[in-house]
Image (cartoon, rainbow, N blue to C red):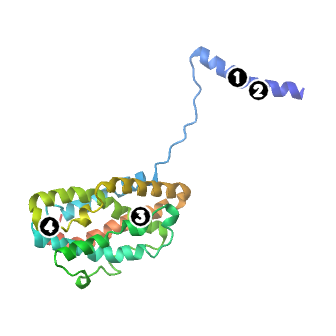
Amino acid sequence: MRAGQNSLLCDKPMIGGLVGKISGYDAPREVIPSVPSLSAQLRAQTAPMHREVEIKLGLPGAIGNRDEYVVWLARFFGLYEPLESSLADFCYWNDLGLELHARNHCSCLVADLAALDAKPHDLPRADRGVLPELPSFAHALGALYVLEGATLGGRVILRDLEARMGAAISGATRFFGGRGDAVELMWTTFRSAVDGFGQERPELRADVVSGAERTFGSIEVWFAPLCAVSGSQV
């Protein structure tokens, strides 16, 4: 009896499946919703803030001459220098295959400012009240997402500036275009690392998004004085 029962149990799905094919009826299948990658989640959830920051900064149009270019680079330095320093305090970057020093933007700003006869060490820095609060590595990963994403738009900004100012900014274009042809590869590598982190630590995805949102907020606050002067404040 036990053997027969087992045989019947095995036969039922086969018979049902055959009847379904003959009658043209397919039994409903359970649909398992797919989870978006963490990079896709970041892009979707930060899109409104990203767009708002882009509008308020008004780049590249907000930069009209060499002096204004120096002012904007100095402002970027004032935020990036302390922010990247705080990111370096976390020790898990290598676990994701990310060499943080290779993604340093501040060194490019220092080189550009020096080429324009500006002294970075005399420039004001964003204080703790302006910098994004990054209590964990997940938050820091979200902050780096914003900085790395900015390299993609940097090339667009640089093309416009070079077309309008040419020799006036010659030798001082590392911040907006220093990665050259490697920018796409470095972004793809970073995005893969973010997605891997999201798969391994799904419970921390919200913290990564929070870190990105806080960074966009800090950018908006830090650049507000320049936005008001340039008339791009919305």
Label 3 belongs to which residue?
142
Estimate how packed mark 3 is, as few (under 14), some (14 to 19) or many (20 or more) residues with alpha carbons within 10 Å: many
Amino acid under disc 2: Cys
Q: Earlier in the sequence, mark 3 or mark 1?
A: 1
| Residue 169 numbered tag | 4
Structural distance between the alpha carbons of marks 2 and 1: 7 Å
Residue at 26% over, 72% down? 109
| Residue, disc 1 | 14
The residue where tag 2 is placed is 10
**Sequence order check, earlier mark of 2 and 3:** 2
Helix, strand or loop under label 2: helix
Whether residue 78 is visible here, answered yes or no, is yes
Query: Quarter of the image containing the C terminus?
Result: bottom left
Residue at the bottom extreme of this rendering: 122
Is 119 located above or below residue 109 in the figure? below
In the rendered image, residue 198, in percent from the top left (x then y), is placed at 50, 56
The quarter of the picture where the N terminus appears is top right
Looking at marks 4 and 2 on the same chain, the residue that comes earlier in the sequence is marked by: 2
Name the amino acid type tagged 3. Gly
Tags 4 and 3 touching, CB below 8 Å: no
State how far apart marks 2 and 3 are (Cα): 51 Å
Q: Nearer the viewer, residue 226 or 158?
A: 158
Which structural element holds mark 1? helix
Task: Name the element at disc 3.
Answer: helix
Residue 46 placement: quadrant: bottom left
* Pointer 2 with pointer 1, Cβ within 8 A: yes
Q: Are marks 2 and 3 in contact (CB under 8 Å)?
A: no
Q: Residues within 10 Å of mark 2 (few under 14, many from 20)?
A: few
| For discs 2 and 3, the disc positioned in front in the rendered view | 3
